[in-house]
């Protein structure tokens, strides 16, 4: 079980709220939980008008809270209560409107117990996969995908990790990360130096190639898949941001730059519409967070280090995600992590040439 011990839990640096009453909280914004969906309402004249509109779309029981940005008549609905282990951040432009009290998720109080349950729930691993990298799952939550380093795209059935298909990339393509979105695979490639987009139904030739002129190490999507963040190496910016429309296959780069925090910036995960995590392969480097400075896609996001995440000089972070209880980080011999509902966990064991599967079937409510 050596590989599971390499998952480290960092306590979030955001404010954790144990209980909070119904009402308004000024200068505060609530971050949606992992299981919460969101909806943006625009051109609302005031809070009461927005609440009336929201209740036309959803019942009171379906709305956890609203983040109100009255300076530009915009509101963010946070749906599907409860918000587990809620995180509040200071935002002078926001008023938080709570429709239900906030409470902690009970299983978060004993992370040692949680890890033990996960360890004991191991399922059979996949057949051999040469040097598996990042992990993603399809729109129907049935097929798991990984990319062999400079090799083929490999898909497995989620329930038992039996092989669903092994698909060679186009001739002479050398790629090593893959992300899935709405029937498309987004591949970060060294050759060509581009973000390569493949249609799920036709993996023999790209449907689009975005020339980043650099190695692409990660992709993340936010705001109902209308914004795409692309992590790159060896440029004067660590991230390229695009306004996108997946229906029309449109990708428009925005004039934004972000500090280079590491020579080998590696993974990037969108936790929700308000938080993206950036991990770096170099030692002694923090995990960084991105949060929106406004709800306009043209405005750059704020970027800052999560101080509790600095690692030792002998460790290297492969990827980090956050669930309702803590931050999960995989190191060194592991390359990718995918955490689904009920704490079903998949890990790509890069050195062991296989995909690991754990399914404790836990409900943290």
Image (spheres, helix red, strand yellow):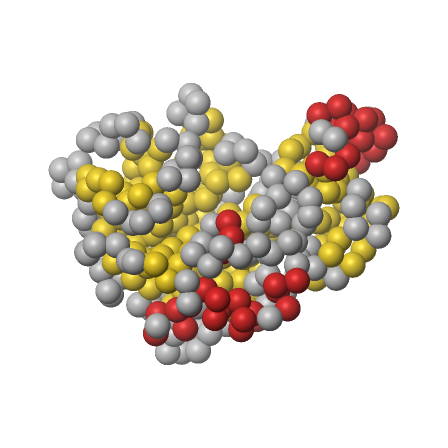
Q: Quadrant of the N terminus?
A: bottom left
Q: Quadrant of the C terminus?
A: bottom right
Total marks placed = 0
- Left/right placement of residue 17 relative to residue 123 reads right
At horizontal 51% and vertical 49% (from top left) the residue drawn is 341
Q: Nearer the viewer, residue 7 or 72?
A: 7
Residue 96 sits in quarter: top right
- Left/right placement of residue 227 relative to residue 149 reads right
- Left/right placement of residue 306 relative to residue 73 reads left
At horizontal 60% and vertical 56% (from top left) the residue drawn is 364
Q: Nearer the viewer, residue 250 or 234?
A: 250
**Rendered location of residue 318, percent (x, y):** 38, 62
At horizontal 39% and vertical 69% (from top left) the residue drawn is 4
**In this rendering, does residue 106 appear at all?**
yes
**Rendered location of residue 328, percent (x, y):** 49, 63
**In this rendering, does residue 347 appear at all?**
no
**Rendered location of residue 3, percent (x, y):** 35, 70
Which residue sits furthest left? Answer: 171
């Amino acid at each position: 079980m050596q590989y599971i011990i390499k998952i480290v839990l960092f306590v979030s640096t955001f404010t954790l709220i144990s209980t909070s009453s119904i009402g308004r909280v000024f200068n505060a914004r609530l971050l949606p939980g992992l299981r919460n969906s969101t909806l943006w309402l625009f051109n609302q004249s005031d809070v009461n008008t927005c609440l009336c509109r929201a209740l036309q779309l959803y019942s009171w029981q379906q709305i956890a809270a609203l983040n109100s940005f009255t300076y530009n008549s915009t509101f963010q609905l946070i749906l599907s209560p409860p918000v587990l282990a809620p995180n509040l951040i200071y935002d002078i432009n926001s008023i938080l409107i709570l429709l239900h009290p906030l409470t902690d998720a009970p299983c978060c109080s004993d992370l040692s117990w949680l890890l033990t349950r996960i360890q004991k729930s191991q399922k059979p691993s996949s057949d051999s996969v040469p040097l598996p990298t990042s992990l993603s799952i399809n729109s129907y939550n049935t097929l798991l995908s990984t990319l062999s380093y400079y090799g083929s795209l490999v898909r497995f059935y989620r329930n038992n990790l039996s092989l669903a298909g092994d698909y060679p990339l186009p001739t002479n393509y050398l790629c090593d990360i893959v992300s899935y979105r709405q029937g498309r695979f987004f591949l970060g490639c060294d050759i060509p130096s581009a973000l390569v987009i493949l249609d799920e139904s036709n993996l023999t030739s790209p449907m689009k190639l975005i020339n980043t002129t650099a190695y692409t190490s990660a992709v993340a999507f936010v705001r109902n898949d209308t914004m795409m963040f692309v992590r790159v190496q060896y440029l004067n910016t660590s991230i390229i941001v695009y306004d996108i429309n997946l229906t029309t296959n449109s990708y428009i780069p925005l004039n934004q730059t972000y500090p280079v925090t590491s020579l080998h910036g590696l993974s990037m995960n969108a936790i929700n519409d308000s938080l993206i995590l950036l991990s770096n392969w170099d030692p002694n480097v923090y995990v960084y967070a991105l949060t929106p400075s406004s709800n306009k896609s043209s405005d750059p996001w704020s970027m800052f280090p999560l101080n509790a995440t600095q690692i030792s000089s002998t460790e290297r972070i492969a990827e980090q995600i956050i669930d309702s209880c803590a931050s999960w980080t995989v190191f060194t011999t592991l390359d990718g992590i995918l955490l689904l509902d009920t704490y079903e966990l998949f890990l790509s064991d890069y050195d062991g040439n296989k995909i690991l599967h754990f399914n404790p079937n836990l409900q943290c409510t």
